[in-house]
Image (cartoon, rainbow, N blue to C red):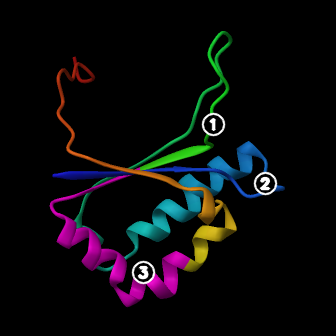
């Protein structure tokens, strides 16, 4: 399983609250409306930094993690006309497309005590 992590910065003029709301309540559901999402997307997570005294200010405003079984599935999903016509045009409305940091990883869970 491959995990694609996208670190994104909000567009100028958008407050942090507007950015988080748009990312969670508009773009994420739009992304998952892709007819092939259930086939190709294994997990989809959006995260937003929490400011904590004593910790450095975050360099990015949001993180999107998308899991795919293979690079082929990733490429097929993003090459689809539905994505290009309906989802991709929404992206510049809330994040700076030219400032994305992307990382592809093979995630290994060492411990998961969330349910206990």
Whether tag 1 and tag 2 are in contact, CB under 8 A, the answer is no
- 3 or 1: tag closer to the N-terminus: 1
- 1 or 2: tag closer to the N-terminus: 2
* 68 or 35: nearer the viewer: 68
Is residue 37 toward the left or the right of residue 95 in the image?
left
Q: Is residue 77 magenta?
A: yes
Which element is circle 3 on?
helix
- Which region shows up in magenta? 65-88
* Mark 3 nearby-residue class (10 Å; few <14, some 14–19, many ≥20): some
Q: CA distance from mark 3 to mark 2?
A: 24 Å
Residue indicated by mark 3: 83
User: Is residue 35 shown to the viewer in this render?
Assistant: yes
Residue 112's quadrant in the figure?
top left
Q: Nearer the viewer, mark 1 or mark 2?
A: 1
Is residue 73 toward the left or the right of residue 33 in the image?
left
* Mark 1 nearby-residue class (10 Å; few <14, some 14–19, many ≥20): few
Residue indicated by mark 2: 14
Residue 8 at what x, y percent from top left? 57, 51
Residue at (57%, 63%) from the top-left corner?
26
Residue at (16%, 63%) from the top-left corner?
70
Which element is circle 1 on?
loop
Q: CA distance from mark 1 to mark 2?
A: 16 Å
Residue at (19%, 20%) from the top-left corner?
111
Residue indicated by mark 1: 59
Whether tag 3 and tag 2 are in contact, CB under 8 A, the answer is no
Is residue 2 toward the left or the right of residue 15 in the image?
left
Q: Is residue 102 above or below residue 84?
A: above
- 3 or 2: tag closer to the N-terminus: 2
Q: Is residue 12 magenta?
A: no
């Amino acid at each position: 399983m491959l995990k694609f992590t996208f670190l994104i910065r909000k567009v100028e003029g958008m407050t942090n609250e507007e950015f988080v709301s748009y990312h969670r309540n508009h773009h994420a559901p739009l992304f998952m409306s892709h007819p092939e999402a259930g086939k190709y997307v294994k997990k989809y997570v959006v995260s937003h930094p929490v400011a904590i005294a004593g910790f450095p200010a975050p360099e990015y405003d949001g993180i999107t993690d998308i899991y795919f079984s293979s690079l082929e599935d990733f490429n097929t999903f993003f090459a689809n006309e539905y994505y290009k016509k309906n989802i991709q045009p929404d992206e510049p409305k809330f994040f700076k497309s030219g400032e994305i940091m992307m990382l592809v990883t093979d995630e290994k869970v060492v411990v998961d005590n969330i349910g206990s």
